[in-house]
């Protein structure tokens, strides 16, 4: 037996107690506290193995359809942009988990690629199961009311504390959930593809007629006629709608958008072992008195065996600091309010949600180079420090005002500070409290997060 396995066995009781503290996670109906009375399971855990393997159901794979092949060509076509240099793939690189390839906080676009965006580019991976935007729990009652009736319910509803061991509390919160982009303003992959195509600080493609004319001149235009008929370009709206549908089909059919091939996926299936650091990080990730990441970044398979997406799809206001690298922030009156605008316009009056942004999946998070909606952080260490010290040592996170006081929550107007999460651990701490995570804890959590990177090579 490897030496580290014996060392882990020597502290096996401590590991089991830690596991018991976080309840049943990632092991189906078998609660972790039962490991204490199952010596074989405890032994397997000490070796980094999953004692209760799951059977994961991955998307089926097949050759791309003709529609998806057309979508692939459009996805990589820079000719639709005003610069002639920016394609979907320019910001959503396949080699970088369909996220940005560079380290800039935000991408630049426009006619000469000089117009800076206002938000960090999210990954396009694992969106095939993203629910539509709604407010409140997903139940039959909510399906009978419209979005603004849901918002009215959520305005005065008490917030249940979310912990990694209590998924019911998370589901009970009447908060926004679902949708695409950081603010949930799109519900379909077609809408998601359209908005950057027309945005003046992204692809800047011009109006619908302009883009349709570019499609008609593109080298792949004959495929449109084959798929949609020779008169498809007679109606620009139809031509663009079909193009966006093709892009959506490409994202659905192309396996690299949702491979579920991380080390963690294989560990869930009992096909890989976690290292001691990865295992410690896994436990910390789900420990409600430590990192408590699992409250929002759910790491358990669904009841029908779908792999975890590492998000509860909900929106949170975390109070991340303002990013001075963003040109938009040179204007002291400018604030990115997430759901309340400025990019989203239909929820501007629902001020109880101002400052809220969508909880992203953590899959492939270790490959990213900027974090949070404004790209303010450049490393996972900085992200974990934010969670650790936001409330107990805010001077480490936020700038000082001219009078020397700490400008806490400086990227959100004070009238919306009540929206910021000060309830869920580790944000329930106060100055003078001990940090939720030690430096060693953070290193272990990062080791675990690295197991979420796809294309892990199994030992043969």
Image (tube, rainbow, N blue to C red):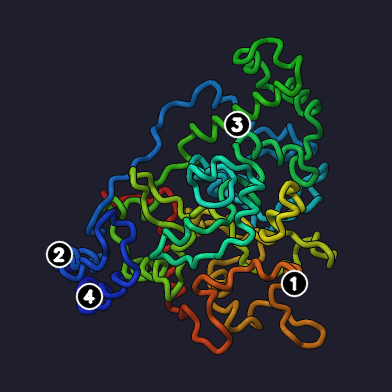
Depicted 322 relative to depicted 69: above or below: below
- Dot placed on the residue nearer the N-terminal end, 4 or 1: 4
For residue 40, which numbered disc appears in the image? Answer: 2
- Dot placed on the residue nearer the N-terminal end, 3 or 4: 4
Q: Quadrant of residue 2?
A: bottom left
Place of residue 338 in the rendered image (x, y in percent of width and height, measured from the top left):
69, 56
Q: Quadrant of residue 196?
A: top right
- Dot placed on the residue nearer the N-terminal end, 3 or 1: 3
For residue 427, which numbered disc appears in the image? Answer: none
**Please, what secondary structure does the residue beneath circle 3 have?**
helix
Residues at circles 4 and 1 in contact by the CB criterion of under 8 Å? no
Disc nearest the viewer among 2 and 1? 1
At a point 58% along the width and 73% down the height, the residue shown is: 422
At a point 81% along the width and 62% down the height, the residue shown is: 334
At a point 58% along the width and 50% down the height, the residue shown is: 135
Q: Quadrant of residue 67?
A: top right
Place of residue 136 in the rendered image (x, y in percent of width and height, measured from the top left):
55, 52
Mark 4 Cα shell of 10 Å, populated few (<14), some (14-19), many (≥20)? some
Q: CA distance from mark 3 to mark 1?
A: 41 Å
Q: CA distance from mark 3 to mark 4?
A: 50 Å
Q: In the rendered image, which residue does mark 4 sit on?
A: 12
Q: CA distance from mark 4 to mark 1?
A: 48 Å
Left or right relative to 69: residue 50: left
Q: In the rendered image, which residue does mark 1 sit on?
A: 414
**Please, what secondary structure does the residue beneath circle 2 have?**
helix
Disc nearest the viewer among 3 and 1? 1
């Amino acid at each position: 037996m490897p030496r580290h396995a014996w060392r882990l066995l020597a502290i096996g009781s401590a590991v089991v107690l830690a596991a018991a503290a976080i309840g049943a996670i990632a092991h189906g109906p078998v609660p972790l506290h039962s490991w204490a009375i199952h010596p074989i399971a405890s032994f397997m855990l000490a070796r980094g193995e999953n004692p209760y393997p799951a059977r994961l159901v991955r998307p089926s794979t097949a050759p791309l359809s003709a529609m998806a092949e057309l979508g692939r060509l459009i996805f990589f076509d820079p000719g639709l942009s005003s610069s002639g240099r920016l394609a979907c793939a320019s910001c959503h690189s396949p080699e970088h988990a369909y996220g940005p390839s560079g380290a800039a906080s935000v991408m630049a676009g426009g006619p000469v690629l000089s117009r800076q965006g206002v938000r960090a580019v999210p990954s396009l991976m694992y969106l095939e199961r993203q629910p539509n935007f709604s407010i409140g729990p997903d139940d039959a009652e909510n399906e009978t009311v419209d979005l603004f009736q849901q918002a009215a319910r959520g305005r005065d509803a008490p917030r249940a504390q979310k912990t990694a061991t209590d998924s019911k509390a998370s589901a009970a919160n009447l908060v926004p959930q679902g949708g695409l982009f950081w603010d949930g303003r799109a519900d379909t992959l077609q809408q998601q593809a359209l908005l950057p195509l027309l945005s003046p600080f992204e692809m800047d493609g011009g109006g619908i007629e302009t883009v349709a004319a570019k499609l008609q001149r593109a080298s792949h235009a004959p495929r449109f006629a084959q798929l949609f008929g020779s008169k498809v370009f007679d109606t620009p709206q139809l031509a663009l709608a079909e193009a966006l549908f093709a892009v959506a089909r490409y994202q659905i059919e192309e396996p690299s958008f949702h491979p579920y091939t991380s080390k963690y996926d294989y560990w869930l299936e009992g096909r890989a072992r976690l290292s001691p650091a990865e295992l410690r990080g896994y436990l910390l990730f789900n420990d409600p008195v430590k990192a408590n990441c699992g409250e929002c970044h759910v790491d358990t398979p669904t009841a029908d065996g779908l792999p975890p997406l590492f998000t509860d799809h909900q929106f949170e206001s975390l109070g991340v600091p303002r990013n001075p690298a963003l040109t938009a922030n040179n204007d002291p009156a400018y604030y990115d309010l997430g759901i309340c605008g400025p990019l989203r316009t239909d929820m501007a009056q629902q001020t109880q949600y101002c400052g809220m942004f969508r909880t992203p999946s953590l899959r492939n998070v270790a490959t990213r180079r900027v974090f949070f909606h404004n790209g303010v952080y450049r490393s996972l260490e900085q992200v974990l420090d934010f969670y650790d010290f936001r409330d107990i040592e805010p001077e480490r996170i936020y700038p000082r005002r001219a009078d020397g006081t700490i400008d806490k929550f400086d990227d959100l107007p004070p009238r919306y500070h009540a929206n910021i999460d000060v309830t869920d651990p580790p944000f329930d701490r106060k100055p003078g409290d001990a940090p939720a995570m030690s430096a060693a804890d953070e290193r272990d959590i990062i080791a675990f997060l690295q197991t979420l990177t796809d294309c892990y090579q199994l030992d043969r």
